[in-house]
Image (cartoon, rainbow, N blue to C red):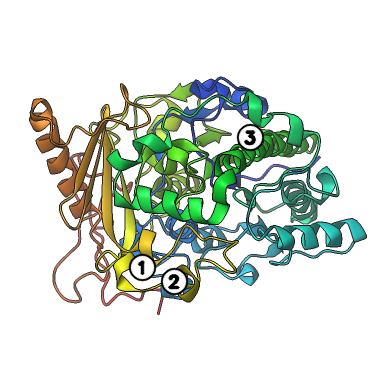
Amino acid sequence: MKSQTAKPNIIIVMTDQQRADLRKSCGYCLDTMPFLDEWSCGGVDFDRAYTPNPTCMPARVSMFTGRYADCHKVRTNHNAIDALYTKDLLDVLKENGYQTALCGKNHSHHNAGDFDFHEETGHLGYEGEINTSQEEIEFADFLVSTRHMETPAPSPGGLEVQHPYRNVTSAFKFIDGADNEKPFFTWVSFAEPHNPYQVPEPYFDMFPPECLPPTLGTKDDLDNKGARFRWLRDKWEDILGDRIEERILRCRSNYHGMLRLIDDQLKRLIEGLRERGLEKNTIVIYVSDHGDFAGEYGLIRKGADLPEVLTRIPFIWQGPGIKPHGKQTDSFVSMVDILPTLCDIIGAEMPLGCQGKSILPLLTGMDIPDREFDCAYSESGFSGLYWNDKDGLTLEEEGASKDHVTFDCLNTWTQCGQVRMLRKDDYRLQLDMMGTGYLYNVKKDPFELINLWDNPDYNKVKTNMLTELAAAMLRACDPIPVPHNRYRTKIHPKGYWHQPYTCSDTGIRNIGPLTCKGK
C-alpha cells in the first residue's frame, strides 16, 4: 500500500475522439461503457462539457495551458512549435512538487522528455512505442497496414498488445516506482477510439454492424449542414467507393467495441488504485479531446465546423474533496477549466494568460457563482479564405490523401477560415468570418437538423445568442502580453468574470514586461 501525501495525486484519463452521447447513462440505447457509467455516479459527470477546439493538438494544448487556440497559436495539428503561454499545467505541478508521467499519446506542445516518466503510444504502432515481443511487433505492423482506415476483421494479438492496456500498465509502472513522499500526476492518454477503427476479440463482435441503431442525421441532411459537410461526404464517397455505407457501419461497430475495451481498462486502472490504497487521495479526471461523427450525417471522424457531436465531450471528476452527485446537467464547462481548477485545488496561483475558470464550486457542492457557467465557447480554423475545388489544389498535392486509399479529414479545406460557436440554454449558435450562421435548438433537435437562423420566430433568440457569442469572443481575447508600463491588469484569481471582486495588493495581476513560452 502506498502512503498518502498532503496534496492529492492527479490522473487525467484522456481518450482521443470520443463523442459524449454514446453511453447508456447519456440516453444511448447500447451499453457501451458500463463501468464508466457506474463510476461516474461517485463523482461529477458534466452533461454540458465542451472542447475548446475539435482538433487533437489544439485541444490538448488548451488543456495544458487553459487557453483557447487562437491565443496559444496551436490552431492545427502541425503548429506545436508556436505554443504561446506563461506557465502551463506541467509547470505548475512541477513547481508544487509533483512527479509527472505521460502514459500514451502525446500530440501536445510538450516533448515526452518534459515528463519525469514517459512511455508513449500513437495510432500506427511506431509512434513512440517500445515493441519488444513478437506479438507487439506484429500488432505494430498491422496498425501500419491499416493506413488509418477501418479493419473488417478482429485485430491480431489480443487485448494485451492494445495500447489502452499498455497505457494502464505504464501508469502502474510509474506509480509503483514513484516517491511515496511526493504527489504524482499521470496523463493516461489513450490514442483510441480514434481511427484506425480497429479492435480485437471479444470486443469486435460485441456491437455487430447489423445491430447498431440508425443514426438520426443521415447523408440526406447534408445539404442543410453547409458546404464543408457536403464536401467531406463527397471525398469519403470517392475514397470508400460503392461500399461506403457498409464500411461506415464497420467503422461504427469497431468504434463501439473500442469504447468497451477502453471501459475495461478504465476499470482496471481504478481497481489498481484501490488495491494500492491510492483511490481516496487521487483525483481522476476522465475527458476526451473532441468527438467523432461516428456515422452521423453519413460521415466518420471529424473535420467540419463545430457541431455538437464533435464539440461535446465526456468530462467526469472524482476524488478527494469532490462531492458525488452524478450527472451535472445545468452548468456549461470546458477543457480549458482543468488548469485553473487544479490550481484552486492544490493552492497554486492560476498562471497569467489562463482563460479557463475554476469549477471547484461545481465539484464540491458550493454555491455556484452567478452567470459563470451559463455558456460554452469553441473555436476552429487557422484563418484565411475558404478553399474549394476550383483553386486547383488536389488532395494528393496537399498531403490529405495517398494512392487514393487514405484520407486525412483535417486538411486545408476543412480547417481554413475561422468559425466560432456558443452553447447557451437550449441553443447552439455557429458563425463564420463570412457571416454564415447556424442556430439550433439542441434540446428539441439534438442532431441539429433544423437550422433556425432565418426563421423570424427565433430572431430574439438569435440576437441574444449573437450578443453572448460576441461577449465570449471578447473574453477570449488574449490578456498577454500585459502592458509593459503603468497599466494594471485586473484578473479574478479563479478566472471568473461576473463576480464582484476588489483587488488587494496581492490580487492585482500586473506583470510586465512578461516572458512567455513559445516562439
As helix, strand or loop, the secondary structure at mark 1 comes to loop
The 10 Å Cα crowd at callout 1, few under 14, some 14 to 19, many 20 or more, is: many
As helix, strand or loop, the secondary structure at mark 3 comes to helix
Residue with the mark numbered 3: 256
Question: At label 2, which amino acid type do we have?
Answer: Asn
Single out the mark in the foreground, 3 or 1: 3
The 10 Å Cα crowd at callout 3, few under 14, some 14 to 19, many 20 or more, is: many
As helix, strand or loop, the secondary structure at mark 2 comes to loop
Mark 3 and mark 1 lie on one chain; the one further toward the N terminus is 1
- What is the C-alpha distance between the residues marked 1 and 2? 8 Å
Judge from the rendering whether residue 401 lies leftward or rightward of residue 36; answer left or right.
left
Task: Pinpoint residue 96: horizontal percent, then vertical percent.
Answer: 54, 58
Which residue is at a point 73% across and 67% down the rendered structure image? Answer: 126
Mark 2 and mark 3 lie on one chain; the one further toward the N terminus is 2
Which residue is at a point 69% across and 42% down the rendered structure image? Answer: 4
Question: At label 1, which amino acid type do we have?
Answer: Lys
Q: Tell me, yes or no, whether the two marked residues, 1 and 2, touch with CB atoms within 8 Å.
A: yes
Residue with the mark numbered 2: 79
- What is the C-alpha distance between the residues marked 3 and 1? 33 Å
Question: At label 3, which amino acid type do we have?
Answer: His
Residue placed most toward the observer, 394 or 77: 394
Judge from the rendering whether residue 126 lies leftward or rightward of residue 468; answer left or right.
right
Q: Is residue 277 visible?
A: no
Task: Pinpoint residue 49: horizontal percent, then vertical percent.
Answer: 41, 37
Task: Pinpoint residue 91: horizontal percent, then vertical percent.
Answer: 51, 64
Judge from the rendering whether residue 288 lies leftward or rightward of residue 149; answer left or right.
left
Mark 1 and mark 2 lie on one chain; the one further toward the N terminus is 1
Q: Quadrant of the N terminus?
A: top right
